[in-house]
Amino acid sequence: MPFARAEIVPEAQQAAVDVLASGWITMGPQTAEFERELASYLGARHVVAVASCTAAIEIALRALRLGRGAAVLTPSLTFCGAVAPIVQAGLRPVLVDVDPDTFLPTPATVQHMAGYPADVPELAAAAGLPASAVVEDAAHGLGAELRGTRLGGASRAACFSFYATKNLPIGEGGAVATDDDELAGYVRTARLHGLSRDAWRRYLPGGSWRYDVAEPGLKANITDVQAAIGRAQLAMLPRWQARRKYLAGQYDAALARVPGLGLPPRPADGRHAWHLYQVRVTSACGISRDAVIDALTDCAIGTSVHFIPVHQLSGYQPILGPEECRSVPVTDQIAQEVLSLPMYPALTDADVTRVADALLGIVGPALGLLGVRAAWGLSWSARARRDGRWPAPCGAAPAMGWSRSAFSTTPLASSVLSGCRCSGLSRRSRR
Ligand SMILES: Cc1ncc(COP(=O)(O)O)c(C=O)c1O
């Protein structure tokens, strides 16, 4: 079971072929239609499609016309693609820590982690910023809402990603959604070198070859091949979002039995986009997050970690400086515990059950062994590791030589074990 699976529906594949055959494959009429349709889905006045969410954030930040070196608040528990544009725009990232439940920043420039909508007005007010100074990283947020307002509705602009694993997968691509006419105009020009007329308009009947560049921009346009795929994929989005929500509910129910596992919270007054289903492997699980990843890998279950905090990446440490790097202790703690499970529309109910059973088989025996360790007076973990039998993926306890009665010394462990599918295969034989 892969961690992610990009689904390109047949209609989108055909749309790409049609564009390739049309003779116009870079940004053009398909892009204009995609922008119109996405704006209608979001209820935004403008959508401007660009090459990536990274580019969207950079151009939106440039549009704010902040002075060189101006501070931009950002969580560190994010993808480097959210912090790189701050640096590239000549601004200074200032890290803010996150809430241990939502993984979201508190008073800060906002990011909608995993699809949980951040409370933009509240955060902007706490940071002493007007909403017009907030650019939302909505890479995870397509489909999310807060108090009936879509992302970007309460800020200057929201930046979306159409990367292969995102809720609207195109492969690559991004967009800025905004109600601000001036900002939209800036993004339209800045995405293509700052050209006063993009190529498509220059070649339209009556178009002119002349152009000017009043302000140098980026080469960050989308293409019509991507836009055509995006249009066909967009038609699927409501169905896909409903499926994600359903799967999150299935996960919640199945994983409630896994002791110590922190489950994702629900927004009190909003709609989660369920881009990710993230759990926390807390110390109460009796096993580290990294060991859980290894054990799930042995069960052929793909996972991911969102994210390695940006301040832990070697190239960002000199940019941020030691003081900034020390300023986010909650992020440091969460980064050791957070784990993203497979979440995509094609995931089946049986897949969710398999993931939950595997987690029960990994975490449950860990706790059971902790419970009996003192009684036995032996170093169970050292012994099991030496024998290559730890951790026990997929509920493989009987094949490991640990008797079931040993687990029954703790009622918790025995109830956990009863939820496992004991395959009888050892870790090595699964490889
Ligand atoms: C939170 C976050 N922000 C920004 C990005 C950058 O998106 P893109 O790959 O479209 O540039 C990503 C990509 O994964 C992301 O997860």
Image: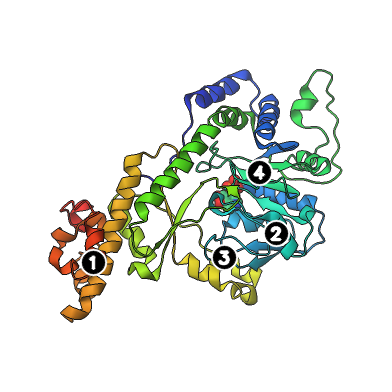
Residue at screen point 70% across, 25% down: 29
Sequence-first disc among 1 and 2: 2
Sequence-first disc among 4 and 1: 4
The answer to whether mark 3 is within 8 Å of ligand 1 is no
Residue at screen point 62% across, 48% down: 138
Using a 10 Å C-alpha cutoff, classify the residue at mark 4 as few (fewer than 14 neighbours), some (14 to 19) or many (20 or more): few
Q: Quadrant of residue 30?
A: top right
- Tell me the residue that label 4 is attached to: 148
Q: Please, is residue 397 above or below residue 430 in the view? A: below
Q: CA distance from mark 2 to mark 3?
A: 14 Å
- Tell me the residue that label 3 is attached to: 99
Q: Nearer the viewer, mark 1 or mark 3?
A: 1
Residue 190 is situated, as x and y percent measured from the top left of the image, at: 77, 43
Q: CA distance from mark 1 to mark 2?
A: 44 Å
What's the residue type where badge 2 is placed? Glu
- Tell me the residue that label 2 is attached to: 122
Using a 10 Å C-alpha cutoff, classify the residue at mark 1 as few (fewer than 14 neighbours), some (14 to 19) or many (20 or more): few
